[in-house]
Amino acid sequence: MRPWHVSLLALLLVGCDHGTKLAAARLLGDGPRSLIANVLELRYAENHDIAFSALSALHLPTPRAALIVVGLLVLAALVFSFRSLRNGDRRSDVGFTLVVAGAVGNLLDRIFRGYVVDFVHLAHWPVFNVADVLIAVGGILLATSLVPKKRAAP
């Protein structure tokens, strides 16, 4: 993928993430909405912690500034690793793009709101958002792009 394709895709995905977060904030304030009984619901939640409330579980403070600085450092590391590790594989390009877009989406929440808006709730799983899905799917694509391809038999 060309750099401008990556940038455009990332920008569109960040826009999608924030559009869904704005809709969740406006439409889910009066309580959750069940989509599939006991399986999937939309529920507005403000996450002042990190994934899976890991910092709370460790009883560590979660200062907003520290989370923003760490987020910026991780984002910078992702961008630099993308530039240096590109192997021309579309799967890895898309994977990096999804991870970066998801990271930017959640980082913008932390910067401008002070928390991340989550709204998708699957039974027996923490509430999450579109950016989290982008990061997870992008990570899977990156991992699968690193697996050596089998060579065709001569």
Image: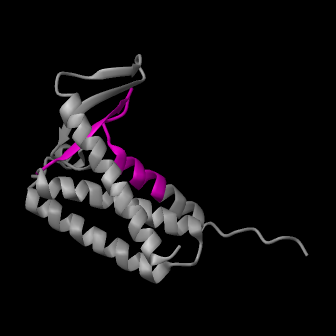
The residue drawn where x is 40% and y is 47% is 133
Please tell me whether residue 47 is drawn above or below residue 68 in the rendered image: above
Q: Residue furthest bottom?
A: 84
The residue drawn where x is 16% and y is 62% is 68
Q: Observer-nearest residue: 142 or 61? A: 142
Q: Quadrant of residue 82?
A: bottom left
Q: Quadrant of residue 11?
A: bottom left
Q: Residue furthest top?
A: 37
Question: What is the x, y in percent for residue 53?
Answer: 23, 44
Describe residue 8's horizontal placement relative to residue 20 as left or right.
right
Based on the picture, tell me whether residue 18 belongs to the magenta stretch.
no
Q: Observer-nearest residue: 140 or 30? A: 30
The residue drawn where x is 58% and y is 68% is 90
Please tell me whether residue 21 is drawn above or below residue 12 in the rendered image: above
Looking at the image, can residue 25 be seen?
Answer: yes
Based on the picture, tell me whether residue 120 belongs to the magenta stretch.
yes
Tell me the quarter of the image containing the C terminus: bottom right
Please tell me whether residue 85 is drawn above or below residue 109 in the rendered image: below
Describe residue 11's horizontal placement relative to residue 112 as left or right.
right
Q: Colour mode?
A: one colour
The residue drawn where x is 43% and y is 52% is 136
Question: What is the x, y in percent for residue 74?
Answer: 28, 68
Q: What span is colored magenta in the figure?
A: 114-138
Describe residue 61's horizontal placement relative to residue 47 as left or right.
left
For the image, the number of numbered tags is 0
